[in-house]
Image (cartoon, rainbow, N blue to C red):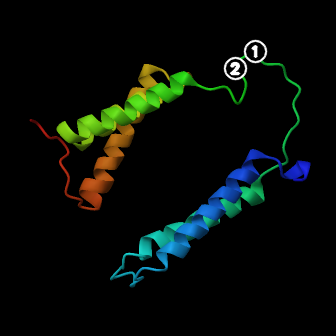
Amino acid sequence: MIPARLQSKDYLGAALLILMGCAVAFIGRSYRMGSLTDMGAGFIPTVLGILVVAVGLLIGLTAGPALETTRVVPHGHGPRAFELRAWGFILAGIAAFVLLGTFGGFVPASFACVFICALGDRQNSLRDAFLLACLLVTAGYFIFHWGLNLQFDAFKWG
């Protein structure tokens, strides 16, 4: 039996992050590590696994106890209600990314994905979704295309 103070979703999330981070770091160690200047195939997975463990530990250390609430909510509007709208927009955003990534390039695919997925949140307006998409596409372009010099088509016509 799990003590009541440890039944918070934060503790469960922290435990899952720690478990996944340990698994990724453990599997990554089976590949060549290399060094910072000559990274092997296992370097990035191992480092990311360790960082995920650290994030899980931080979440677990800062998590509070589960709160008991007696609030009455209408049917279908509770914290565990299935959000068909959100799932629909997220799946549509992924589909748009795949289609536009194939035929339109990075910028249109990323913009469409972020814009459509942001509409899944009832609190976002069209303006908010548009601004978020513009900011993330701009940041992604500068980070990946210009900063990391990755070779991808920003725009692909035809």
Does the residue at mark 1 contact the one at mark 2 (Cβ under 8 Å)?
Answer: yes
Classify 10 Å Cα crowding around label 2: few (below 14), some (14-19), many (20 and above). few
User: Label for residue 144?
Assistant: none
- Reading the image, the residue beneath label 1 is 74
Left or right position of 24 against 136: right
What's under tag 2, amino acid-wise? His
In the image, is residue 114 above or below residue 39?
A: above
Is there any visible trace of residue 3 in the rendered image? yes
Left or right position of 4 against 19: right
Classify 10 Å Cα crowding around label 1: few (below 14), some (14-19), many (20 and above). few
What's under tag 1, amino acid-wise? Pro
The answer to which quarter of the image holds residue 89 is top left
Q: Residue at x 60, y 69 (%)?
A: 22
- Reading the image, the residue beneath label 2 is 77
Is there any visible trace of residue 108 in the rendered image? no
Q: Residue at x 20, y 52 (%)?
A: 152
Helix, strand or loop under label 1: loop
**114 or 128: nearer the eye?**
114
Q: Residue at x 71, y 29 (%)?
A: 79
Residue that sits furthest to the front in the current view: 1
Helix, strand or loop under label 2: loop
Q: Quadrant of the C terminus?
A: top left
Q: From mark 1 to mark 2, how far is it between C-alphas?
A: 6 Å
| Residue 51 image offset from top left, x and y in percent | 56, 66
| Residue 109 image offset from top left, x and y in percent | 28, 37
Q: Residue at x 78, y 18 (%)?
A: 73
